[in-house]
Image (cartoon, grey):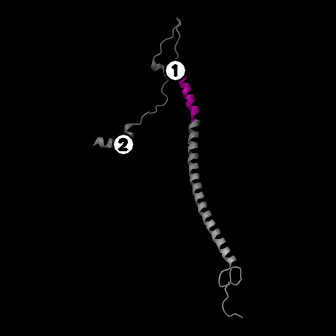
Amino acid sequence: MNSGPRHTSFGGQPASSGQSPMLLARINEKKTELENLKQLRDLSAGLAAQMQTLEDKLSTLSDGTQAVAAVLSNWHTVLQAINMASMKIPKPKISEGGEATEITPENTLPQTLVRIPVEPEPSLLHPQNDLGKEM
């Protein structure tokens, strides 16, 4: 019997002074598998980050779509109001002689329904300038 310690390999077989070619091949195979798994992990992390970005963009898109839907749902009411206002536009009256009476430009347009500022107020654009002028 041999009184010295026996070294065994992964397969339970005694290891010789040099590693067997099968064991080296298996180690290399496992190293390659490990590298592939690391690449898979890195690619999966990148894909997860892209999916998170996509989720954020879709959330923004969904919010924008809801805002557009709200605006579009109001257009029917707006168009009805415009139609009602345009019904009040005076039409030229035809006199007995066949001539139309003159309508002034003030009477050709309907009454203003809503006043919407076309240009912003200067005080809203430069609030710090207004403070400087008061002093």
Asked if residue 20 is among those painted magenta in the image, a careful observer would answer no
Give residue 6's mark. none
Query: Which x, y percent locates residue 62?
Result: 58, 46
The residue at 45%/19% (across/down) is 105
Question: Considering only vertical position in the picture, is 106 above or below 98?
Answer: below
Question: Considering only vertical position in the picture, is 131 above or below 87?
Answer: below
- Badge 1: residue crowd in 10 Å (few <14, some 14–19, many ≥20): few
Query: Which x, y percent locates residue 3?
Result: 68, 94
Callout 2 amino acid: Pro
Picture mark count: 2
Q: Residue furthest left?
A: 135
The residue at 58%/55% (across/down) is 50
Task: Name the secondary structure under disc 2.
Answer: helix
Task: Name the secondary structure under disc 1.
Answer: loop
Q: Quadrant of the N terminus?
A: bottom right
Between circles 2 and 1, the one closer to the viewer is 2
Query: Which x, y percent locates residue 91?
Result: 53, 16
Q: Residue furthest top?
A: 97
The residue at 57%/32% (across/down) is 77
Question: In front: 44, or 58?
Answer: 44
- Badge 2: residue crowd in 10 Å (few <14, some 14–19, many ≥20): few
Question: In front: 54, or 26?
Answer: 26
Q: Which residue position holds label 2?
A: 127
Asked if residue 75 is among those painted magenta in the image, a careful observer would answer yes
Q: Quadrant of the C terminus?
A: top left
Callout 1 amino acid: Ile
Query: Which x, y percent locates residue 111?
Result: 48, 25
Q: Which residue position holds label 1?
A: 89
Direction from residue 14 to residue 51 in the image, left or right:
left
The residue at 49%/20% (across/down) is 108
The magenta segment is 74-88
Label 2 to label 1: alpha-carbon separation: 41 Å
